[in-house]
Image (spheres, rainbow, N blue to C red):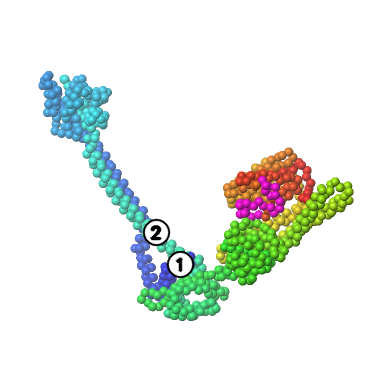
Amino acid sequence: MARAFAGSASMRRLAQIKGQLFGQHSDRTSLTGHLRLLAEPTYQRLLRSEPFMRRLIPALCLVFIASLAVYRSLELYYDHQATARQARDEIALTATVISSHLASEETNLPELGYRSALQRVLADSLPVGATSNGRIILVADKDGTIVASAPLRPTLEGMQITDIFSASQPLTVFGARAGVLTVKATLLRNGASENTMATVHHLDGRLGMIAVLQPEDDIYAEWHADVSANVTLFVGTASVLLVLIYAFFAQATRAEQADEMYAATRGRIDTALTHGRCGLFDWDQSRGRMFWSASLYELLGREPKDDILSFSEVNAIAHPEDVDLMALAEHLLQSGETMIDQMFRMRHQDGNWVWLRARGEIQREPGRSEPHLIGICIDVTEQHELAEQSRTADLRLRDAIETISEAFVLWNARNELVICNSNYQALHGLPANVIKPGTPYQDVMSAAANTQIAPQAMSVSQRDAAADGSYEVELDDGRWLQISERRTKDGGFVSVGTDITALKRHEEKLMDSERKLKATITDLRKSRQTLEVQAQQLVELADKYAHEKTKAEEANKAKSEFLANISHELRTPLNAIIGFSDIMTQEMFGPLGGERYSEYSRDIHESGTHLLNVINDILDMSKIEAGRMSINAEDINAAEAASDAARIITAAAAEKAITVSCDVAEDLTVLGDRRALKQILLNLLANAVKFTPEKGMVALTAERADDRIRFIIEDTGIGIAEADIERLAKPFVQVENQFTKSHKGSGLGLAIARSLIELHGGELEIASEVSKGTAVSFTLAASSTTVPAQAELL
């Protein structure tokens, strides 16, 4: 973060302003005047009242909108009531006037042309505006048949008044006493039924009644138009006020965000300078004066002050071997360079030296020619010490690798040499100029004397495709080497070569003895007819066979003891490698610096730990073959042992999303060695997880079979061909295929498990099908069965 601030123009400008602020009295006075202006009472009152105004103004606007809505709603409601009363009065008055006129003229109506005459009388008796606004007048005879209407509607004549009003309608029963009512009237307009205000007056004589009707839609038409106009006006007014409220809030929010951005910017700058262990400086080169920020004073343990430092004061605390300020100033002025990036030491107040990295740029203010070197100083003392510690750690690691008695070499992912010891150099006869770090693999191999050692003779592409493991090769001088190759996490290779010439000699002697024995047996078969004659020879041959067998067993025992001894020898330098790499990984003496150093340390530690595990497997196998492995029989809860093993292997299975299940009854108890049973289960579960693809399944179950307990480990892995099952549990044997090439292993896990099972008097069984999975089972005695306290595997 400090470098980002140093590289930005805004930080350089800030440093320049600070230098001018603390270096010139006139600038200080100007800033004080601005602060005094901001502190005026009116402005302060505005700041205090702003939160209140932000709440009050929207509230007032909303109250105004609500008051306006209530007022207009009440006004429209009262208009509605007035319109209804006026309509009722007009209907009642019209009915009264017409009924009076018809009653006086009814006796003058002729018999012939009665209806037409009645229609004329009705038209003459209508007051002005009687049929306006949708009003209808109907006249019915005593039978309730409509005989006249106004305005004239021939379609209604001849209809019953009850077709418009129901027979039980109070209007037709009570007449004028029912007043004006709102009813559902039909056949008035297009035969539709609608709400209608109506009144009915009964008449004497041939006429039965007169009805005056007016649809409510016509009554309230003008009122509805008024409502629409008021609603439109109210919505427009409210929308304008809401837009004004939104604009007010948007403006206030923008002002608040601007204040927050200003405060956040100042906070970031202060945090960067105070906690980022860096400081700003402004060097006036023309006057030889320098301004320091408070954080730069704190880096050097000095009391911050506002005074300008002189050139001599700064030069006095700078280390003379790192920087010469005078020479630096002359160089910048003469060369015309505008940027500097330099590391140097300055004396701390307690007398120690602090490493600083200064980065800056020369700035010139408009209208002024005085150059100012403005920049930032960063405390890099820890980085410098870390680099020294890293170099020391590299030297220690090289010394540890050099003490290994085996040939050791490490290649990176680009097949370039990382490190090798003198034993590797001597083994291949490499010149000193070839074993430099970074030398390509092909260049090293082209200069090697023993190019027959694979995979060193392979091409780069073949080497990348090579599987991890161990193999044996014979050199031109007759020596034998066992070379262990392991791929590192970064894609490189680590190789360890061990001289096994003596072991190979013993193996050759054993093979020669075996051939001689086979030849002897063949001769005995051919000489079966002369057996009596050659009885003495047979005894001698039997003695010779026994002697050779004893020698073979002694040679095999010597091989096992040699493996045990050489494994012990390997563990001594490996412990140093693991220990030093663990110290570096945990950064016990300080950070390593770069992330890749930490990654390399973890890789070395993990590779050393893996190699140590391989050696431990070799030791266990050697002890078994030498007959020094014993078991201590005790009662063991099978469910507890199986659960512990499944829990331990779950972490490795989770990396490949493999489901590990354990289903063992709590009442099953076996008689055996607790540590050996745990090792058997762990080895078999580890093999199942190792050769099961991602998202597979591994299941551990147990069942009682007579007086024994059978453990079964099933997986959904790659499976094993039937031809390979027989040799799979032999030491150092692995079935090679495309899947196993990408997995590490010594090939001893299954052999150790089988040997421990046989020590318990059990038997290991393997059932598998390629690409479908494998089931490995073994039996141990139940707790009720007696087994020897100790047993040896011969």
What amino acid is labelled 1 in the image?
A: Phe
Residue range (magenta): 722-745
| Residue at image coords 89%, 48% | 533
What amino acid is labelled 2 in the image?
A: Gln
Q: Secondary structure at mark 1?
A: helix
Q: Are marks 1 and 2 in contact (CB under 8 Å)?
A: no
The answer to whether residue 740 is magenta is yes
Tell me if residue 768 comes above or below residue 164 in the rendering: below
Q: Where is residue 452 shown, x and y percent of the image?
A: 66, 63
Residue tagged 1: 5
State which quadrant residue 590 falls in: bottom right
Closest to the camera, between mark 1 and mark 2, is 1
Residue tagged 2: 257
- Please say whether residue 390 is visible from this viewpoint: no
What is the C-alpha distance between the residues marked 1 and 2? 23 Å
- Of the two numbered discs 1 and 2 on the same chain, state the one appearing first in sequence: 1
